[in-house]
Amino acid sequence: MKYMLALFEEEMLLAKPKDDGKNKRKKDKTPVSNGLVEWSFLYFKYLQVYTKLEDCYDQIVHPQKRRDAKKALEACIGRILEIKSFMVILHEGGEYYDFSDHLVNRKLSFEVLNVIPPRFLTDDNKALLESREKFLIAALTKHGLMNVPEPTKPPSVLTLDEAAIVIQAEERGRQARQKITEIQKIRAMQEVELARQKAGVESHTRESACLVIQRVIRGFLGRVRTRKAALEELTFIGMNNFQPPDPEDPRKKLVEINDRRKKGQLENELELQNATCATLQKIKDLEGQEMCEIIQERVNVYLNENREPETGMYQGLPKKKDGGSYLIVDPLPPIERPVSDKDKEKRGDDQQQKKRKKTKGGQVPPPKFPEPDEDAPPTCPDYFRRFVKGSHDLYKKNWFDKDDYGNFEQKFVPDLLKSALRPIVFEEVGS
């Protein structure tokens, strides 16, 4: 998360307008880059943060932490798409950019640039994907576009007499085949002996026979060593398909750990969902009456503040587009936006002009919105940037310096669940 905050601050510095560059450009008349290098480096950093966040979300077992991490992951994905689209604009429609300089400076391989789809797309929608696959197979089979093998019929059950006859026939055949192989070996040995006698070769003595046996054994052992070395090399590069599975294989253990983690994630999420319904009803029963009194008090304060003392009439409620009566119960905090000196001067001039026109004509003219400047440089869309900052602040607020030493099974935290459900109950009571 701290990497996301660092990228957010770096992006704020990158998005600031540069007024000094205009004066230098007029004096030097040198071409200035459009910021493609800086934005590409920012895109490269966001990719690295995305891979780390994706692995983090896949390995977290705590259900509430997973929800907060998913918000950060979705915000990071949206920001990557925004920066990529802005890079295409800066690159004059080119979708490819050479990141070799960034990779060389950071001593990384090209595998870092591989954008892997998030695993929660398949994990969260596993049941939906399986149902779609079954429907597709059924539709293809119905229209004859997919060949489904017919189920084989099981063999008929034999009686004791039929089974005895089959066993006797198999045993007679085995004995006959063994006898024929022995006869063939004897004939081959006799032919070799006759050929040696015709050639005038003397029969082997004890020493010559030992030499022949040693030569054969050495050749056999050499072939065994060569085959073993070849299998070890194939196993090292992962191409030995004939090796039996090793019970202590780390890849097998990794699959077992992933399955156990997925099972724990599912159990904790189901437990959180069940506890959410019970906690929601409990908050309504214990704190619902107090919330009603708070809402009534705020409505009374609003009516007293907006009552005309002379006539005793009340002003109307806020308009629907402004929030309606919900604005009375839970008013929005004021949004503070940075204002430059030029904007302040323009506001002062506009207010003076409005006062003059109001004194002359008695009517205030409609506000004039600034026309878009066609010569202004393009700006990067920043819709997901606030979500990047908000997700970081939320995760830091809930889990920074959080002691989970006693929560070994990574179960949900009831206090956080209650604080998340109170605004929902408050809104239901107010409506």
Image: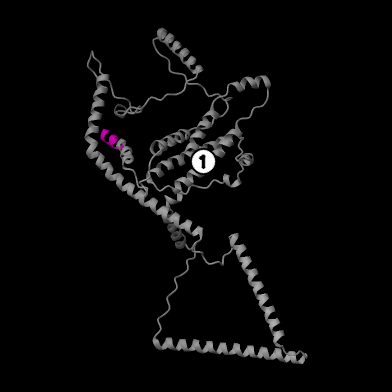
**What is the magenta segment's predominant secondary structure?**
helix
Q: Residue 18: x and y, percent?
A: 57, 24
Residue 280, percent across and down?
28, 41
Residue 58 belongs to the span the image colors magenta: no
Q: Residue at the spot x=68%, y=79% of the render?
A: 214
Write the residue at 37% across / 49% down. 408
* 208 with respect to 242 (left or right): right
Q: Secondary structure at mark 1?
A: helix
- Residue 22: name its quadrant: top right
Return the x and y of residue 223 as percentages of the image width and height: 65, 72
Tag 1: amino acid: Val
State the residue in front, 261 or 110. Answer: 261
Residue 218 in sight here: yes
Q: Is residue 69 above or below residue 219?
A: above
* Residue of label 1: 49
> How is the structure coloured here?
one colour
**Part of the protein shown in magenta:** 424-431
* Residue 416 percent across, percent down from the top left: 33, 40
Above or below for 311 versus 113: above
Q: Is residue 87 visible?
A: no
Tell which residue pokes out farthest to the top in this image: 360
At a point 59% along the width and 89% down the height, the residue shown is 180
Relative to 283, is 203 on the left or the right? right
